[in-house]
Amino acid sequence: MKFFVDTADIDAIRELHELNLVDGVTTNPSLIKKSGRDIFEVTKEICELVDGPVSAEVIALDYDAMIAEGRKLAEIADNVVIKLPLTLDGLRACKTLSGEGHRINVTLCFSANQALLAAKAGASYISPFIGRLDDINLDGIDLIEDIRTIYDNYGYETEVLAASIRTVNHITECAKIGADVITAPPAVIRAMASHVLTDKGLDAFVKDAKDAGIRIV
């Protein structure tokens, strides 16, 4: 499973990249706003840092404007993936831009039917939002499983990119189901390395080493 980091924070991306934990990056207008930087400037810097796909999202809602914005974003770097909303205009733009050879991430997916439409429109990635479904008492993991089954049934090449990841358990469940990619905030990816029993074991080892006077260098 590939790990994308969901942020526009260059320092956070660099830290995880140095640990070989970044296969790609996803951004959106809210993350760009949080970074406090110009969308073109920060996206270009991310693309130079990371070899893998970097999703940059349009802000337009109508087809013609999405096409113009998508083409403009694609000029930033060869590894830019154009991010489009899962609306009829977004699907139409997906068909056009994917037909021109651009990679497309269709976002804000909340149903298997939406995911099926995105695959038929030529999306490279579909981004189902797990956490936001959980927020309204629906099981986001069930959606990932449904999409995986449908895509496998018909041989769709669109990759399942599990998004709105809130917990490390979300990542575990997505891996078990067979999601192609997860995208998560840096803090959630870092938290995967933590376990209370690891910390407890280390505390005991450090104490015993000190008591025994053990030195290695």
Image (spheres, rainbow, N blue to C red):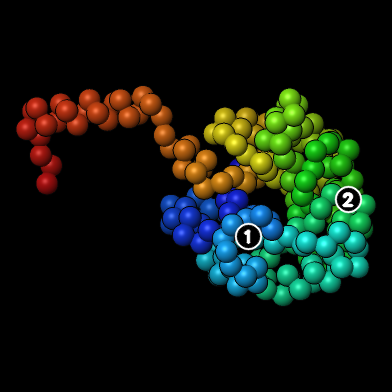
What residue does disc 2 label? 87
Q: Distance between the residues labelled 1 and 2?
A: 23 Å
In the rendered image of this protein, does residue 29 appear above or below residue 155? below
In the depicted view, which residue is nearer to us: 158 or 39? 39
Under mark 1, the amino acid is Lys
In the image, is 74 to the left or to the right of 189? right
Q: Residue at 74%, 33% (x, y): give it.
A: 133
Mark number displayed over residue 109: none
In the depicted view, which residue is nearer to us: 66 or 151? 66
In the depicted view, which residue is nearer to us: 107 or 79? 107
What residue does disc 1 label? 33
Residue 113: x percent and y percent? Answer: 88, 38
Residue 122: x percent and y percent? Answer: 85, 55
In the image, is 136 to the left or to the right of 211? right
- When asked about the image quadrant of residue 66, the answer is bottom right
Residue 159: x percent and y percent? Answer: 74, 47
Classify 10 Å Cα crowding around label 1: few (below 14), some (14-19), many (20 and above).
few
Q: Residue at 79%, 43% (x, y): give it.
A: 109
Q: What element carries label 2?
A: loop
Q: Residue at 73%, 60% (x, y): give it.
A: 57
In the current view of this chain or complex, which residue is farthest to the left?
A: 213
Q: Earlier in the sequence, mark 1 or mark 2?
A: 1
Residue 40 visible to an observer of this rendering = yes
Q: Residue at 52%, 48% (x, y): give it.
A: 186
Residue 145 visible to an observer of this rendering = no
In the image, is 107 to the left or to the right of 216? right
Residue 61: x percent and y percent? Answer: 86, 59
Under mark 2, the amino acid is Thr
